[in-house]
Amino acid sequence: YRAGSSEPAGLPFSAVLETAVALGAPLIRIWAGTSSTAHTDDAQRRYVIDDCQRICRMTCDAGMRIACEFHDGTLTDSAEATHALLRAVDHPACATFWQPPHGLPSDDAAAGLRLLLPWLSHLHVFHWWPDAGHRLLLANGTKRWRQFFAVLADDPRDHWASLEFLPNDDPGLLPQEAQTLRQLLAEVATTQMQTRSSVVSHK
């Protein structure tokens, strides 16, 4: 569902919501409009925000939430743009996904993730570097992802880390990629336990 676009094009959000309820899904992923922040005028941006607020009320009544895809070509094409949109929507049922922007240095990407942390739902995990034309194994990006997962270390909420892409779209690489992700998450869990133990001992 694309906020500000799908409903007038013939896809009512009520149908999307009805499907999600039937499936028992806790979250509906949406796209924030059909154009980038730089190419969306004030009137269209307002229309997207209004639609997000409308569907948030609908999902909230159903005990669910929405989460915006963090993606180019939408009003969530950067951390700053996503932050501005979420603050404008200003509804507890509105969250965002996150994935590392292509080519953005790790420190900058981590800072963007930290900015969005209060609204974060889940993460899409993959390693494309330096651009979308180079889909590499996650093992090549472990240093980068350790930094991203460290941002989440003090967040008490649960977040799903989902493998979204495979190099060369090869499903045969899924076990290898999944094992890398498990190792990264295990490292994060170990670090969290050590940090908490250290805090308790100092008390």
Image (cartoon, helix red, strand yellow):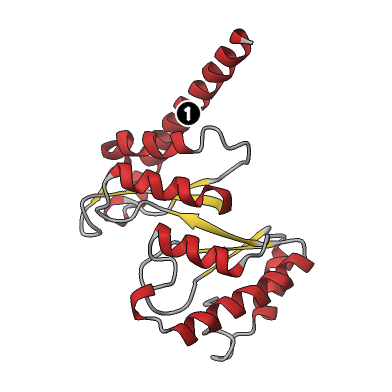
**Residue 120 appears left or right of 14:** left
Q: Is residue 194 visible?
A: yes
In which quadrant of the rendered image does the C terminus lie?
top right
As displayed, is residue 189 above or below residue 44?
Answer: above
Q: Percent from the top left, x then y, of residue 146?
A: 38, 33
What is the x, y in percent for residue 64? 71, 61
Image point (70%, 79%), residue name: 14
Q: Residue at x 36, y 68 (%)?
A: 72
Q: Is residue 40 left or right of residue 128?
A: right
- Residue positioned 32% across, 35% down in the render: 142
Q: Is residue 26 left or right of residue 160?
A: right
Q: Amino acid type of disc 1?
A: Val
Q: Position of residue 130 (x, y in %)?
A: 20, 51
**Within 10 Å of the Cα at label 1, are there few (<14), some (14-19), or many (20+) other Cα atoms?**
some
Residue 69 in sight from this viewpoint = no
**Which one is nearer the viewer's eye here, 134 or 103?**
103
Question: For mark 1, what is the residue?
Answer: 188
Residue at the farthest top position = 201
| Residue at x 56% of width, y 63% of height | 87
Residue 188, image x, y percentages: 47, 28
At mark 1, the secondary structure is helix
Given residues 33 and 172, the one toward you in this image is 33
Quarter assignment of residue 19:
bottom right
Q: Nearer the viewer, residue 4 or 185?
A: 4
Q: Is residue 16 above or below residue 138?
A: below
Examine the image and state in which quarter residue 66 appears: bottom right
The quadrant of the rendering that contains the N terminus is: bottom right
